[in-house]
Amino acid sequence: MKMEQQPDYRVYPSLLIAFQSLLDYELVAEEDWNKVTEAAHERGEYLDRDIGDYKLTPDEMYVKLECDLLDSINRVDGRYGEAAAKGTAFNEIVDCLIENRKSKNKDCIIYSTANASGNKIIRSEIDGFTFDFDVALCKETAYYFSGSLTQYYANATMETSFGTVLLYGFIDEWVGNLMYDIKTTGKYSWGKFEQGWQRHVYPWCVIEAGDTTEVESFTYYVVEWAYQKKGEPLKAKAIYQETYTYNHEESGRKIRDMLESFIPWLIERKKMGLIQDKRIFGGVNPEGWSGQPTDPNKLAKLLFKQSA
């Protein structure tokens, strides 16, 4: 029996998204979330800066984005925070309703209850956070995706000039020849997920693996959260769909170009002793392993010394 060759690298879309942000760090530094707000001053934050000033300079933003990427690669516990936990919890609730099952995520406890105001809600406890979701929103979203394949594991290998790369990840919802990724956000504007590599990687993987012959489009189904008053469950201010037509040849080219930019960065960071994870280089981590957070001060000294 022929042994399957181990890949030289293992990469999932979120890493490519984080690397894209790193490449675009100057544009990221100009985004609204990096500006000091009146609310921040009221909380006693950034008092050394005027409202509208940037919280982080472009160089500081670069260090932050590289720390975030390294911590994701190194599988540091608690690296994603409250917003990501909220999105994960909502997605798991929707999938539980679609499949009429309990949560498969051992880190996500889900149950129906009434909150302090007596409103029926679906509660989720995840990563140290507790979220109360509006029942109608959860049911409406599940109904929209009824009949879909949920959390479908997609994977395929791509040959690059640096070796074989295993691309992998989970498709949130797959219905016929349409794919969806459920996103949640506090503020939405059109094109927010244009740089989302899921729309290239997942369709490419299932076609290359022979799971299907055609994917028509990939859609980001976006729930924009409404302002949550005390005692109220999480509701949607609006729901948007950001749809991209899929072209297999074009996406394959884009993925390969991105990988051949990302892998040299990986190799260099490994030489610098910044990557602890073995899986990304085709290896195996000990069971239950998680890495240590990157020290931003040490990283800044190392990066700016390298570029000096």
Image: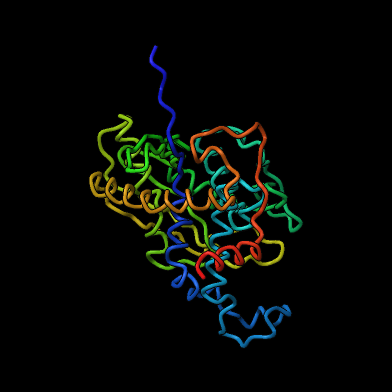
Q: Quadrant of the N terminus?
A: top left
Q: Quadrant of residue 298?
A: bottom right
Q: Is residue 303 shown above or below 247?
A: below
| Closer to us: 54 or 134 | 54
Q: Is residue 207 left or right of residue 80?
A: left
Q: Quadrant of residue 205?
A: top left
Residue depicted at x 72% and y 78%:
43
Residue depicted at x 50% and y 62%:
224
Q: Is residue 239 visible?
A: yes
Residue depicted at x 66% and y 66%:
297
Q: Is residue 8 shown above or below 218?
A: above
Counting from the top left corner in percent of width and height, residue 206 is at 34, 35
Counting from the top left corner in percent of width and height, residue 73 is at 55, 48
Counting from the top left corner in percent of width and height, residue 162 is at 37, 42
Q: Is residue 302 left or right of residue 8?
A: right
| Closer to us: 235 or 77 | 77
**Colouring used for the render:** rainbow
